[in-house]
Amino acid sequence: MADGTQGRQVEERWLDTGSGPGRVVQVYVYPADPVETARRALKVHLENCAECAPDSWCPVSDRLYAAYRGERGPAS
Ligand SMILES: [Zn+2]
């Protein structure tokens, strides 16, 4: 399922609620892998974007692809 949760890890973190005692919450974290994260984001986008076609990507895909390639992408 392409729900964006692949590869997640569950980590417990302390949440300071600001008043009263804090508490421990479970959060989803992803391994520190920007390329994999960008690749996944691009894949999810392409599967859900109405403007993207296999031979015609929208500007969002261009930026996601640039991120995947380790580039900064268009400045907009
Ligand atoms: Zn798109």
Image (cartoon, rainbow, N blue to C red):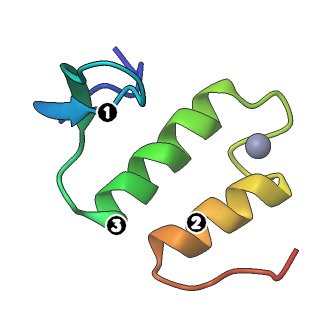
Please state the quadrant of the image where ligand 1 appears. top right
Q: Pick whichever of labels 3 and 2 is earlier in the sequence.
A: 3
**Residue type highlighted by circle 1:** Asp
Compared across the picture, whether 17 is left or right of 9 comes to right
Secondary structure under tag 3 reads helix
**Residue 19, placed above or below residue 16:** above
**Residue type highlighted by circle 3:** Val
Residue 62 drawn at (x, y percent): 72, 65
According to the picture, the residue beneath numbered tag 3 turns out to be: 35
Residue at the image position 59 percent from the left and 28 percent from the top: 47
Q: Which mark is residue 16?
A: 1
**Residue type highlighted by circle 2:** Tyr
Give whichever of 34, 29 is nearer the camera.
29
Residue density around tag 3, few if under 14, some if 14–19, many if 20 or more, within 10 Å: some
Real-space CA distance between mark 3 and mark 2, rounded to the nearest whole angstrom = 10 Å
Q: In which quadrant will I find the N terminus?
A: top left
Compared across the picture, whether 67 is left or right of 34 comes to right
**Residue 35, placed above or below residue 18:** below
Q: Tally the marks.
A: 3
Q: Which mark is residue 65?
A: 2
Secondary structure under tag 1 reads loop
